[in-house]
């Protein structure tokens, strides 16, 4: 009974934290930033470069997060991430050149880097004794990402009826509300975990250096090269190349957000039954199909269908559950920070590479390139599955 009560209280904390962090996600910057950057004098190369610049700050912030959560507590690490996001929205509201937008996006990257490992390690610490680890991750992550259901539509209407700067003002107000609520949360690292990580941090990093983790990192880089490049290029393609407008894009992204809300839970449920790696392979197969369709269509119906294919299975719940099973609890902060840095390497390479390919060739070649990268992702997961099978 005591264990169940403790678990219930912990899940309550994770849910409350997810709700706090979700507030600023009620506006979707990916809907407006690509065109906003171009309208300030940028082009596709600058667009890709600005998105890639975020990934130079985010890895450092993730490493800082695993240290700061022990030095000043997880609560104040989260608070600092919200303050960074608040300042970013303020700068975006007053931005009149690409440099100001770039600085704002670096602050957003800092906020994400401080937030994500703290949030994931806290959640993993709570649910690892559960029999449905992946599904629990799916539920918490769905709560965290719930605003993405309405955010693109809301953002599209704000941008077209008012203007883009009101999107940034809305984000500023929501971040301020999030900051006020975060002051009440109690989410500190346990004394035992704090002692272990402080005294064995470098040892923990060495424990991550094995073939299984290398393969997981390889697959993660390949997936995030595609994920990070796809959203800005897709948004630009819809609005600027096909001239379907912000509202069409907003409805499409909102539909994808609605599907994602349930698919995170379903992906976790499937991972608990079929295995985390099998579901991760399924993610690659569906997204490969989507990229192939997008390469050969301009039809709104097929574009919508292909976009929904990318949302039917989500990688985060099975990947986070797999890490929780692979690592000891005293390595969670280090493990989630490390895999976050690996994601950021993919985020750095992806937008720059794919925007260059799009600028040099066209969107069709870019989508085909993404499909090939996803095939490499699937192959790396196949080798990871074999490696884990033989190591059992």
Image (cartoon, helix red, strand yellow):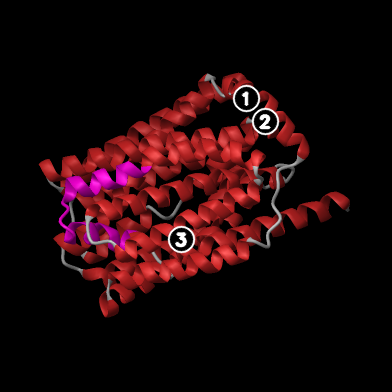
Q: What residue does disc 1 label?
A: 204
Tag 1 or tag 3, which sits nearer the N-term?
A: 3
Secondary structure of the residue carrying numbered label 1: helix
Q: Residue at x 58, y 52 (%)?
A: 78
Would you say the residues marked 1 and 2 are in contact, meaning their CB atoms lie under 8 Å apart? yes
Q: Residue at x 33, y 59 (%)?
A: 30
State the quadrant of the C terminus: top right
Would you identify the image quadrant in which residue 184 lies? bottom right
Q: What residue does disc 2 label?
A: 197
Q: Along the line of sight, which residue is nearer the eye, 276 or 184? A: 184
Secondary structure of the residue carrying numbered label 2: helix
In this picture, residue 165 sits left or right of residue 321: left
Tag 3 or tag 2, which sits nearer the N-term?
A: 3
Please tell me how crowded label 1 is: few (under 14), some (14-19), or many (20+) other residues with Cα within 10 Å: many
Q: Is 51 part of what is drawn in magenta?
A: yes
Tag 2 or tag 1, which sits nearer the N-term?
A: 2
Q: Could you tell me residue 119's position as x and y percent?
A: 59, 49
Give the spatial CA distance, label 2 vs label 3.
Answer: 30 Å
Q: Which residues are magenta?
A: 30-54
Q: Could you tell me residue 135's position as x and y percent?
A: 62, 51
Give the spatial CA distance, label 1 vs label 2.
Answer: 8 Å
In this picture, residue 38 sits left or right of residue 86: left
The disc label shown at residue 86, or none: 3
């Amino acid at each position: 009974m005591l264990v169940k009560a403790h678990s219930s209280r912990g899940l309550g904390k994770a849910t409350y934290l997810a709700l706090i962090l979700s507030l600023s996600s009620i506006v979707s910057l990916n809907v407006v930033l690509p065109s906003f950057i171009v309208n300030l004098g940028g082009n596709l190369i600058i667009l890709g470069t600005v998105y890639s610049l975020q990934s130079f700050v985010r890895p450092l912030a993730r490493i800082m997060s695993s240290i700061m959560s022990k030095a000043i507590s997880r609560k104040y690490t989260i608070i600092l991430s919200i303050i960074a996001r608040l300042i970013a929205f303020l700068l975006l509201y007053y931005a009149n050149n690409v440099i100001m937008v770039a600085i704002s996006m670096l602050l957003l990257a800092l906020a994400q880097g401080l937030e994500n490992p703290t949030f994931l390690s806290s959640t993993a610490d709570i649910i690892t004794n559960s029999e449905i680890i992946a599904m629990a991750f799916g539920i918490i992550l769905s709560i965290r990402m719930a605003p993405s259901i309405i955010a693109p539509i809301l953002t599209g209407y704000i941008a077209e009826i008012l203007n883009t700067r009101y999107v940034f003002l809305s984000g500023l107000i929501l971040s301020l509300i999030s900051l006020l609520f975060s002051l009440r949360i109690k989410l500190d690292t346990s004394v035992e975990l704090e002692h272990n990580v402080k005294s064995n941090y470098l040892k923990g990093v060495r424990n991550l250096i094995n073939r299984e983790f290398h393969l997981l990192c390889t697959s993660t880089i390949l997936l995030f090269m595609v994920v990070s490049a796809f959203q800005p290029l897709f948004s630009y393609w819809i609005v600027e190349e096909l001239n379907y407008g912000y509202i069409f894009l907003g409805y499409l992204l909102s539909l994808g957000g609605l599907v994602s809300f349930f698919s995170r839970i379903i992906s976790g449920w499937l991972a608990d039954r079929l295995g985390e790696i099998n579901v991760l392979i399924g993610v690659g197969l569906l997204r490969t199909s989507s990229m192939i369709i997008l390469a050969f269509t301009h039809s709104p119906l097929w574009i919508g269908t292909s976009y929904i294919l990318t949302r039917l299975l989500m990688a985060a719940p099975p990947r986070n559950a797999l890490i929780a099973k692979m690592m000891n609890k005293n390595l969670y902060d280090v493990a989630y920070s490390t895999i976050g840095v690996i994601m950021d390497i993919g985020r750095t390479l992806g937008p720059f590479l794919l925007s260059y390919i799009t600028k040099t060739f066209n969107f069709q070649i870019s989508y085909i390139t993404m499909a090939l990268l996803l095939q490499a992702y699937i192959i790396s997961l196949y080798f990871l599955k074999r490696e884990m099978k033989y190591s059992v």
